Image (cartoon, rainbow, N blue to C red):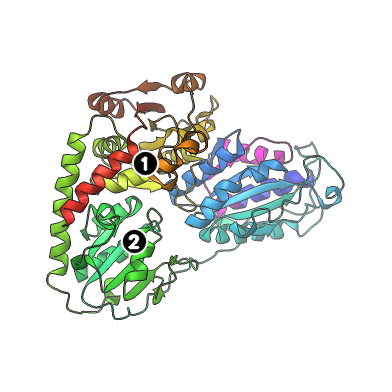
Amino acid sequence: MNPSTAQARVLVDELVRCGVRQVVVCPGSRNAPLSIALHAAALAGRLTLHVRIDERSAGFFALGLAKGSAAPVAITCTSGTAVANLHPAVLEAHHAGVGLLLLTADRPAELQSTGANQTIAQRGVFGAAASVVDFPVAERRAGQNAIWRATVCRAVAAAADGPVQVNLPLREPLVPDADPDWPEPLAGRAREQPWTVVSTREIVTGQQLPDLGSRVLLVLGDGEQVLLTEAATAAAAAGWPVLAEPTALGAALAAGAELIANGALIMSGAELPEALRPSGLVVAGRPTLARWVAKLMRATPAVHVVDANPRWTDPAHAAHSVSTRLTPAEVPARQQDPGWLAGWRQVDDAVAVAVHKFLADQPWPTGLQVAREVVAALPADALLLLGSSNPVRLVDLVATPRADLRVHANRGVAGIDGSVSTAAGLAIGAGRPGYALLGDLTFLHDTNGLLLGPAEQRPDLTVVVLNDGGGGIFSLLEQGAPEHAESFERVFGTPHQVDLAALCAAHRVPHRRVRTVSELRSALAAEPGLRVVEVPVPREGLRAAHGVLRAAVDEALT
């Protein structure tokens, strides 16, 4: 067999031995040796193969698979701009700490800088967002097998911390030939063992906390569930109130923490009441949804950050200390202010009443109402992916937390791209029913996530699209103020006239447009499969409605 074929077969075999079970293939010529070897491994039942035409969507699909299966996922593509199209998903995976193995086929050295077709300087094209493992060009000589297998083991081990680009310069011929001769055996270790066994690295135990005083507050952001659950368990033992973003709610509830369900609304006011101002703040994970976290960090006398990532969360540059874990053993047995937790509970109850009344008084449908209803209506043990624009914030503001719902969002860099593909990967990777709540622009940004060949596994995924005909979130930001009305609609509102039903029909994906609460509940309870549920909501009056909600909450706080 030719060198490229030999290298591809060994690489795929070692990937399986290292525990990689899900691989995404983007069709191309230069990566043909890998694609053929992966297809053979899939036919032998050694791995699950997924084929996606669009590299950008494929990257996010692989990201979702990795998050859903809690294991690194490999993806291969041809050389040139195909590699560049993986970059958005690589950035998200890097900042979220998700393991991806990017098997990027490349032209060999003799074709670089020669004007050869589809040839770019792609080694390290992802910059700091991915570490790089270089494969040598395959040669027909002894000693190659050990090099190839050991290199695969290094790459898989590195993927425990995030994306790894495995750059593979491949020479023609790129398809198998009839020559069976090879100068050495290409077998791996006995008993299907990896060539190199890498021990799992353990997180270093957190250090003793600084003096946080008697009024301590824990804020949970996006992050590893083990880290968040440990921190929430420590807070439960200490009696600290806990504020959690949607992706951290499961950890807080599983730990039995004193969750303040309406924390986002309480904290987003103009000024926090004196009775709720902490003497010490603990931030675990990476809060990304609101500006109040940085503001609170600056205003709190003592701030401790819990984050296993060396790029720990501290946008306010206010942290006094950082540790990689927080467990009950690290929490000092200090006396809490007896009225501290009770005061938070009282305010939380008052705000809950105000929110319930506000939503009942609003004409259906609004984004806030739909977000609350979707979270409430989903079946137990479902997965929910929230779009990074309005949906995740709507859920953060008004949805009732549920312990039996696993909430995800692409909060690494919080882009709106790739959300349909990420949700599909999550559902398949976790093997559970998946749901996504997306805005219309987020959905349109990744309709190629619906592009599935007849042989591909179809996710059990319901995509709920809040269709307000444009960029509703900008109505709530500075750009949405009346003084900017002249420029707003064209450059921020960005209206469109896309017929989502026709778009779904082109992909042969069932579509249903709902206009009432009962229709939404019925659509969410439909038979398993891939489908789109569209909920038209008005964009006009959005800023005013949020102003009414803010006023109601402020009144409850006084």
Image height of 112 relative to 532, above or below:
below
In the rendered image, residue 270 lying in the magenta stretch gets the answer: no
Q: CA distance from mark 2 to mark 1?
A: 22 Å
Residue located beneath label 1 in the image = 391
Is 166 positioned to the left or the right of 490 in the image?
right
Which is nearer the eye, 549 or 199? 549
Please give the range of residues in magenta.
15-43
Q: Could you tell me the amino acid type at mark 1?
A: Pro
Which-is-in-front pick, marks 2 and 1? 1
Q: Position of residue 153 (x, y in %)?
A: 60, 59
Image height of 552 relative to 468, above or below:
below
Disc 1 crowd rating (10 Å Cα; few below 14, some 14-19, many 20+) is many
In the rendered image, residue 36 lying in the magenta stretch gets the answer: yes
Q: Position of residue 14 (x, y in %)?
A: 61, 52
Residue shown at the point (36%, 73%) measured from the top left: 304
Mark sitting on residue 531 = none
Task: Return the disc, 2 or 1, that comes first in the chain's sequence.
Answer: 2
Q: Could you tell me the amino acid type at mark 2?
A: Leu
Image height of 227 relative to 45, above or below:
below
Q: At numbered mark 2, what does the secondary structure look like: helix, strand or loop?
A: helix
Q: Position of residue 256 (x, y in %)?
A: 21, 59
Q: At numbered mark 1, what does the secondary structure look like: helix, strand or loop?
A: helix
Which is nearer the eye, 297 or 421? 297
Quarter of the image containing the C terminus? bottom left
Residue shown at the point (52%, 46%) measured from the top left: 21
Residue located beneath label 2 in the image = 228
Residue shown at the point (19%, 44%) measured from the top left: 355
Is 235 positioned to the left or the right of 293 in the image?
left
Quarter of the image containing the N terminus? top right
Is 504 positioned to the left or the right of 167 in the image?
left
Asked whether the viewer can see residue 408, the reply is: yes
